[in-house]
Amino acid sequence: MRQKLHHIIFIVIAALLMTGCTGKGSQSLSDIPDDIVQTHGDSIALAARFTGDFNHFLAVTDSLADAGELSQIRADGLRGVAYFQMGQIDKCLECLRSAIADETPPAADFWEYIHAGTNLVIILNSQRNYDSAMRTALRLIDLLKQTDSPRSAEELQTLYLCLGDTQLMLKRSDDAVESYNEAYQCVLHTRNNSTSRPLAASIETVENIAASQINHHLEAGIWVDRMDSLLAVYEAQPKAIDKEVKTFRALVLLHRAQVCQMQGKEAEAARYYEQYKPTDYGSSIEGQINGCDYLVEARRYAEAADNYTQLDRFIKEWGYEYDLETIGNNLLPKLRSNYHAGRRDSALHVAMQIAEVYDSALVQQKQRDAAEMATIYDVQGKERQIAAHRAGKRLFTAISIAVAILALLILAFAVYVFRQWRATKEKNRILANQIAEAVEYREKLREQKKMQAATDSTAGAGLSISDFTTLTDEQLFLCLRDLIESERLFLQPDFGRQTLIDRTGLSKDRIGAAFAQGSDSNSLPAYVRELRLDYAIRLMNDQPDIAVEQVSQASGFTSADTFTRNFRAKYGMTPTAYKQTKA
């Protein structure tokens, strides 16, 4: 009866508020906390996320939301992360849009709201849905400008960076320059802390702006200077990461070479590039590919062609696809480099590769364009509905203010009584259920692995290389999985499909089909990456004092940068940050 009364009160108050709210909304932004406040539900969800099982993470998030331990905004933001990690981008976008559906989020969830919105802008940009990305970024920027929190500058620099990138892609260069300058002002006002992570992130922001300016042949010298100045400050910090400093320093040299080349200072550009090449980053695969833009501009086609021999490996390690943008940014320069270097056979091979991937890339682009237009029409329709709704509510503005104040007081009291009663009952249940669920989940997982290992051992007994031809794709995957895991082949940095071809005599297509049908990861590189990351997690759990570089080498990654990039993509944080949570 008491719970029913609370529901009645809530419905009445909600109705009053719906008729009484004005255009900008009644929520005040003055009570926003200075930083993210982690709740008990957040801690449970975060623990589920670190298991690496994102279906489990999604189930825990839903359970916590149903029990009232997570607000709708927090739950939708976490669901978006889960779906992104599972490769379900449409569902990811749906959840992130739901998280920021309200124009005025509750103060307690403000930073989770902004974080979900920023993730949405980044993904929309990556999907080339520039119109929706720009609308969302501008709305979040407007909201952040109404707050006085010192955290606002940190969030604004990312949003202004995304906004500038979007404007560049839409050929609005002047607007992009203005957005980038706003991002830099936010960089200057971003507070640093003892970890120096905010400062490192600011350097990355400025580096991204410099790279965007260079790629669009705009003035970038001032951005390289700004990056250099911030880097000097970062180097002086007691917790500056040496590997990161060296990478940033190498990028400064590369960007200076590109800027000088654009300005016609070819000799000076060449000197900067010669300093860049022997650096750790410059000699890495990523560094060689990034250096190709300068080499092509400098007409050093033979060197560019040499570097581009690593392109397929680079695309595979980064998890890219050969879409229209990748073809334009990488394959066409590779074709031009080989052609001008006199390597006609290589140029012909690249041309055939472009022909093979062009059709599928074009289809993907058309699908993205169609989705973007649908989103535009949807947004415009909603905006018209909102405008009409606001026009009707203005008639009741005077009385609605008084009603809203009274309603908020009643709502605050009702929510307090209701949550106190519910929290006492539900917290104990949630804790017990989550502990039991976690124990049961781990136990079942161990038992399943034991049973699967026994089954695989029986099914695969006595098989020779020729026997593989009689197996289904699912059976072949189990055999290959057993080979990879039992002999720990995934810990070899150069392990790949060719290793399995050499070991089994199977064809490239046969191995690819086995992993596409039998593995949840859909491809051999993705499957191996999962094994390496799982191994790295166990290694850091067992040896909390081990260095990230040692974890990277032991886990089979080609470099600490590659390890960090893949780790952050899966878990949403760097290995260093994860190690700190274990300290």
Image (spheres, grey):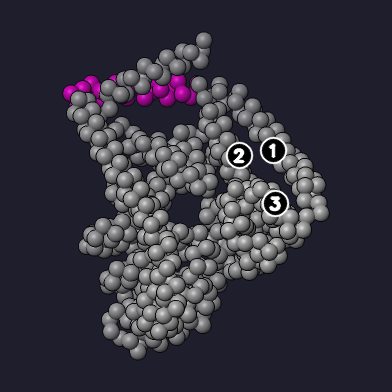
Q: Quadrant of the C terminus?
A: bottom right
Between marks 2 and 1, how big is the CA–CA gap?
9 Å
- Answer whether labels 1 and 3 touch (C-beta < 8 Å): no
For the residue pair 545 and 525, the one nearer the viewer reads as 525
In the rendered image, which quarter is residue 242 located in? bottom right
The answer to whether residue 397 is above or below residue 158 is above
For the residue pair 453 and 69, the one nearer the viewer reads as 453
Q: Amino acid at mark 3?
A: Thr
Q: Amino acid at mark 2?
A: His
The answer to whether residue 7 is left or right of residue 373 is right
- Answer whether labels 3 and 2 touch (C-beta < 8 Å): no
Q: Secondary structure at mark 3?
A: helix
Q: Amino acid at mark 1?
A: Tyr
Magenta residue span: 394-417
Q: Which sits earlier in the primary sequence, circle 3 or circle 2?
A: 2
The label shown at residue 441 is 1
Q: Secondary structure at mark 1?
A: helix
Q: Which sits earlier in the primary sequence, circle 1 or circle 3?
A: 1
Q: Is residue 500 magenta?
A: no
> Is residue 23 among what the camera can see?
no
The label shown at residue 56 is 2
Q: Main secondary structure of the magenta part?
A: helix
The answer to whether residue 82 is above or below residue 402 is below
